[in-house]
Structures are given as C-alpha cells and as structure tokens.
Amino acid sequence: MKQYDVIIIGAGQAGSPLARKMGKAGKKTAIIEKRWIGGTCVNDGCTPTKTWVASARAAYLAGRCNNLGVHIDGYSIDMPQIKKRKDDIVMHSRSGNQKSLEEDPNIDVLFGEASFSGHKTLTVKLNDGGTEEILAEQIFINAGLQTVIPDIEGLSDIDYLTSTSILELETVPQHILVIGGNYIGLEFGQMFRRFGSQITLLERGPRIMSHEDEDVSHEVHNILEEEGIAIFTNTRATKFEKNAHGRILATLDIDGRTEVMEVTHVLVAAGREPQTEALKIDATGVETDEKGFVKVDNKLQTNVPGIYALGDITGGPAFTHISYNDFTIVWRNLLMGENLTTDDRPLPYCMFTDPQLGRVGITETEAKKQGINYKVAVLKMTGVARAVEVGETRGLMKAVVNADTKEILGVAILSEEGGEIMSVMQMAMQGGITYDRIRYCVFAHPTYSESLNNLFMKLE
C-alpha cells in the first residue's frame, strides 16, 4: 500500500487547485480522477455550455436584427463547427489543467475510480487496468454530482440525453422533450430552440424555477414562451416507447389529463445527486445525510478528523465558484494557519438564459418566511435607458431591502448582462452600502448599472 501525505478524490474546481497548493507545499499528493481533469465545469458544465450559449445568441441576433436596421438575408446553423469550437476550448482548458498537475514532482495523477477500503485507505481501479491501494492522513473528497435518472417506464430504452451527452450532438434535433424546469433544462431548451429545434419542456410543479420568487419565474416563463418554447407545468412523463419510424412516443400526465406526444429526443434535466455510493464512504466512517451528501462542518471537515469534502458533494449550492471558494478556505486554513469558515459567505449565481438571471442574497419569499420588515423595489427593463437603446428590454430588476436598516437583502437581475449587474449589487451588499446611498450614486451613463438609481427610487 502506497503512503501519501494527501489524497484528493476528484479533479474538479476544488480538487485540482488544492493538489497544486499541496504539491507546492512539499506534500506528496495523489489526485484521483475517473474521467477528465477539470471536473464538470470544464468538461460538460460551464465552459462547453457557455460556448454553445454564445453560438445560440448569435443565431438569435441574426434572426431579429431587422428592427435595428440591419438586414440579414439568411443564416444557417453549422452544428459540427459549433461543436468543434466547444471541443477546442474544452481541450485547451482540460489539457492546461492536466499539464500543471503532471509537471509537479510531488503530485501523482491517477486516472481511475476510487473507493474507500478502510480507515483513510482507498482502492483505485485504474482506467488502464489494475488497481492501486493507497492511504493518507489527509483526504479531500471533491467527487461532485451526477444526473438523476427518474424512474419512468421505457426511459432506459430510448437513448435519452443528459447534460453531458447532449454536448456531443453534431446535428440539430427536430423536437426535444426536456424533463425538468430548472436552470439546466431552461438553458439547454432556449439554446436548442435558437439552433432550430422544437422544444417542449415539462415541469412537475406548478411553475418553473421553484426556488425563485413567483414574479421572476413568471417573467422567465413568458420570455421562453415568446421564443416558441412550449412549457407544461403540473406535468410528468409516465412512459416512453419508440414507434415504427424510430421516433419517441412520450405519454404525459398533464394536470391529470393523459396525452401522447411524438418527439425525436428526450433530455433528462431533473436534478443531480451525489456520487457517494460508489465511493463506499461508510468504510472510513464518514457520515452522509439521507440523500447521500457528505456532512461537513463550517471548515469543510467531515466527522472523521483529516477527511474533508469540498464542492457539490457536500449538498451546498452546486456552483463552480462555491467549489473554488471551498478550496480557498481549506488550503488557507491548513497551509496558512488561518481560521476561515463558510459561515455567512455570499452565494451569488447566474442562470445563462438570455436574458441572464443574476441572483444574490435572499428572495422576497425568504424574507417573508423570516419575518423581516422588508420592502421590494422592481424596475422593468423597458424602463432602463441602456436596454431601450440596445433593444434588449425583456426582464426586470428586483431588490429586497430591510425597511428598518435600509440594508440590501437580496437582488434578482433578469436582463442582458444580468450577472454583471448582480455582481455590482453583491459588492454593495458585502460593503454594507445601503440602498439610499445607491439611489444617488454616480454611475457612468448610459450603463445598465446606472439604472440601479431608478430601481431604488421606487422605494421613495
């Protein structure tokens, strides 16, 4: 059995930089990855999907620029070229990350699947054959999540798509049935609608984006329907089968009514689950919750001293930037002697539909549940000068504030570059800048952020 100072399971956005820090600190480190260096973000998450979002937006602009006085006689979608551009960008990032790990003499990169065999001991089934038995006093789990495959009759027989396999398509599907009305399903649905697919989206609940405020959810719903996406709420698929022509027949329960729909592809985007079962994590005594997420304290350590978990597998917000922040907390605590925690850190995120939805802080719904004396400001993008000038007036800005202290509690920015405007508000929130100060702040004209003046004028 080979002894290391540090073992890292998963080369995602926490695991890879942590391995480099440990290697530079002189610690003999093993990092185990069963797929590709870079994790979901680089390989089948943020990086590839946002390259396709860019292509889809270019198609959208080409199709609607007549109202700006620019006339395009016609355009076509070159899906192989779109895929090649995505693949090139992914490979550049993946290979760069892998090279930086392999060049460090203190780091061993093991490609294979890890499972615990005992207390702080692991068996690695190597991808190229054979196994390795390794152990270390410090172990970091960054194994991430996998797509939840719902138990629907016939689903396993139709060669369904996931957020990973859909990225390998080189032709535009004729009709995609999307199962799931949250961020992944909405991004892919709009993207492929703009590529030319017919899109039908199913949501089991009464509305899409159930974690957002109802008015924000409603606004996104309307935007997507305006682009030709058919959205069915209170709907679930109950059966799939192929017909004689190779097409898929989907039996749907639409608010208690049965309907059969013919589609060409099915995208499963009904959520993600932790990959702890394959790790046999109970062999080392690490506790998980009822859903299989690894339990950690506010310094990301498990109940077993010396074993940590970072990123999505802890059950916290499943975002790359949170995983990376986990890494910064752990390495600074262990190597720099700091005393950092995850307590009260901001949790910003952005859904890259078009327009984007940038969110940070609490929603109006959460403020109400907490019994806070709050006020809400809403500004439609039709009232934003910059949006009118560039012809991007879909969406809204929304802020929730404490009526007593004037503290900004949360914002939702649904607009072009909504993530960037949200980041301006995040900086204000972290700096303790109250909404009455932003109301009269001098912003450059004409920018989107300038309309934060008008947003908070709504509270006068």
Image: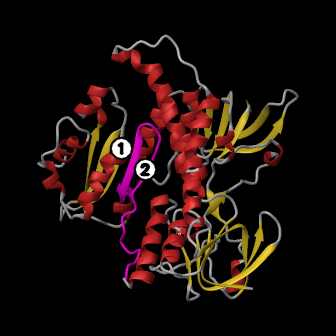
Give, as a three-letter code, the residue at label 2: Cys
Where residue 359 sits in the image (x, y, percent)? 38, 52
The quarter in which the N terminus is drawn is: bottom right
Local secondary structure at mark 1: helix
Q: Is residue 438 visible?
A: yes
Residue at 78% of width from left, 46% of height from top? 155
Where residue 157 sits in the image (x, y, percent)? 83, 44
Residue 418: mark: 1
Q: Nearer the viewer, residue 183 or 106?
A: 106
- Provide the residue designation for mark 2: 350
Precedes in sequence: disc 1 or disc 2: 2
Asked if residue 373 is positioned above or below residue 108 in the image, the reply reads: above
Residue at 61% of width from left, 47% of height from top? 180
**Spatial CA span between label 1 and label 2:** 8 Å
Residue at 61% of width from left, 59% of height from top? 37
Asked if residue 9 is positioned above or below residue 355 in the image, the reply reads: below
> What range of the chain is rendered magenta?
339-365
Asked if residue 134 is positioned above or below residue 187 in the image, the reply reads: below
Where residue 20 sits in the image (x, y, percent)? 51, 70
Residue at 51% of width from left, 77% of height from top? 22
